[in-house]
Amino acid sequence: MLRDSDYFGVGFGQPLKITETADGTLADDDGLAPFMWEASYQFKVNDSLTMIPAVFGANDIQSSAEQDIFGLALTTKFKF
């Protein structure tokens, strides 16, 4: 059940990629651009407890290897 105090969050993007170094040499370019994303949902369990589950991932985070990451996170806020 959704309430007025619930929030959805989505984020995605790509970090900057080196194409040329300061001395003018070209960087190795394998054509892959890293891509990162995150989605979260914030809801109040009661007046003093808020939970924020999130899922995140990224692909090709290192140009020398095809490395992908995926994870889950849970943030709990307690106010009294």
Image (cartoon, rainbow, N blue to C red):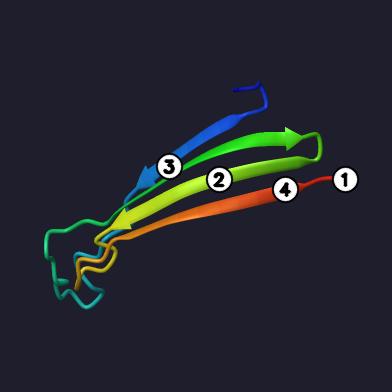
Pointer 1 residue: 80
Q: Is residue 27 above or below residue 72?
A: below
Callout 2, which amino acid? Pro
Q: Which mark is residue 77?
A: 4
Write the residue at 22% across / 78% down: 23
Dot 3 amino acid type: Gly
- Distance of mark 2 from mark 4, alpha carbons? 11 Å
Q: Which is in the foreground here, disc 3 or disc 2?
A: 2
Residue 8, horizontal then vertical, whole percent: 52, 32
> Which label lies toward us, 1 or 3?
1
Q: Residues within 10 Å of mark 2 (few under 14, many from 20)?
A: some
Quadrant occupied by the N terminus: top right
Labelled disc at residue 53: 2
Q: CA distance from mark 1 to mark 3?
A: 30 Å
Q: In this rendering, is residue 77 above or below 45?
A: below
Q: What SS does tag 4 mark?
A: strand
The quarter of the displayed image where residue 24 is located: bottom left
Label 2, secondary structure: give it.
strand
Image coordinates for residue 45, horizontal then vertical, percent: 71, 36
Judge left or right: residue 37 versus residue 17. right
Q: Earlier in the sequence, mark 1 or mark 3?
A: 3
Q: Dot 3: within a 10 Å radius of its alpha carbon, few (fewer than 14), some, or many (20 or more) residues?
A: few
Q: Position of residue 67 (x, y in %)?
A: 25, 66
Tell which residue pokes out farthest to the right in this image: 80
Label 4 amino acid?
Answer: Lys
Name the residue carrying label 3.
11
> From what the image shows, is residue 45 above or below residue 19?
above
Separation (CA) of disc 1 from disc 4: 10 Å
